[in-house]
């Protein structure tokens, strides 16, 4: 009986950690360089699974087949997007692309067969636009496939901090 009483605090800690891991935060390892320079191969990012209020330029992790991919949200539901001469246009209005100084080929949402992004879907791109396999290749991402928003890099230790 005494052993059971001594184990109860440890069991409570284990249960709390499991609940937090399943429903609130999850560590995700970056695989590849499609998010360079923001995130590098083998960086570890904490994923906020609780926040489903996805905004433009959030970094999200989503399920694609049997892989989890990490990309930046560029287009939101009910928007028309295009890149012309490296400039992002949302509903024909020029948008500053989060100060990323990366080369982006011309792209039109019409290339995917859409006039506007349907409700419940997002257009995502990697920050390393030349190497990224993103919505330009794999199509729009359903909100139900998004696992959460990347908020905090926890590895490598010398680069701990919020991701932008």
Image (cartoon, grey):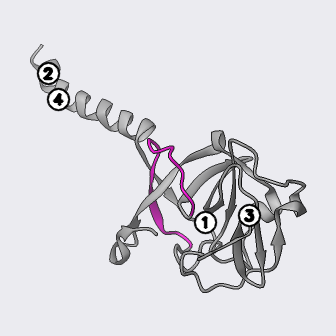
Q: In the structure shown, which secondary structural element does the residue marked by tag 2 occupy?
A: helix
Label 3–label 2 contact, CB within 8 A: no
The image quarter containing residue 17 is top left
Label 2 vs label 1: CA separation? Answer: 44 Å
Front residue of this view, candidates 62 and 2: 62
Q: Residue at x 58, y 81 (%)?
A: 100
Which residue, given by chain and number where applicable, does mark 3 sit on? 134
Which residue, given by chain and number where applicable, does mark 2 sit on? 3
Which residue, given by chain and number where applicable, does mark 4 sit on? 9
Q: Is residue 26 left or right of residue 75?
A: left
- Mark with earlier residue (3, 2): 2
Q: Is residue 12 above or below residue 55?
A: above
Q: In the structure shown, which secondary structural element does the residue marked by tag 3 occupy?
A: loop
- Mark with earlier residue (1, 4): 4
Residue 48 image point, x, y percent: 44, 49
- Mark with earlier residue (2, 1): 2
Front residue of this view, candidates 7 and 55: 55
**Residue range of the region highlighted in magenta in the rendering:** 41-56
- Mark with earlier residue (4, 3): 4
Label 1 vs label 4: CA separation? Answer: 37 Å
Label 1 vs label 3: CA separation? Answer: 14 Å
Q: Is residue 65 left or right of residue 12?
A: right
Looking at the rendered structure, which numbered label has been put on residue 31?
1
């Amino acid at each position: 009986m005494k052993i059971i009483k001594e184990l109860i605090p440890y069991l409570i800690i284990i249960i709390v950690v499991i609940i937090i891991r399943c429903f609130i935060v999850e560590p995700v390892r970056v695989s590849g360089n499609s998010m360079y320079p923001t995130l590098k191969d083998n960086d570890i990012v904490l994923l906020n699974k609780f926040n489903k209020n996805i905004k433009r330029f959030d970094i999200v992790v989503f399920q694609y087949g049997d892989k989890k991919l990490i990309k930046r949200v560029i287009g939101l539901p009910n928007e028309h997007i295009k890149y012309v001469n490296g400039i992002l246009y949302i509903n024909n209005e020029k948008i500053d692309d989060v100060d990323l100084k990366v080369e982006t080929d011309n792209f039109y949402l019409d290339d995917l067969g859409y006039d506007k992004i349907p409700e419940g879907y997002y257009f995502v791109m990697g920050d390393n636009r030349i190497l990224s396999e993103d919505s330009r290749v794999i199509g729009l991402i359903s909100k139900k496939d998004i696992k959460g928003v990347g908020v905090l890099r926890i590895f490598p230790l010398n680069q701990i901090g919020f991701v932008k």
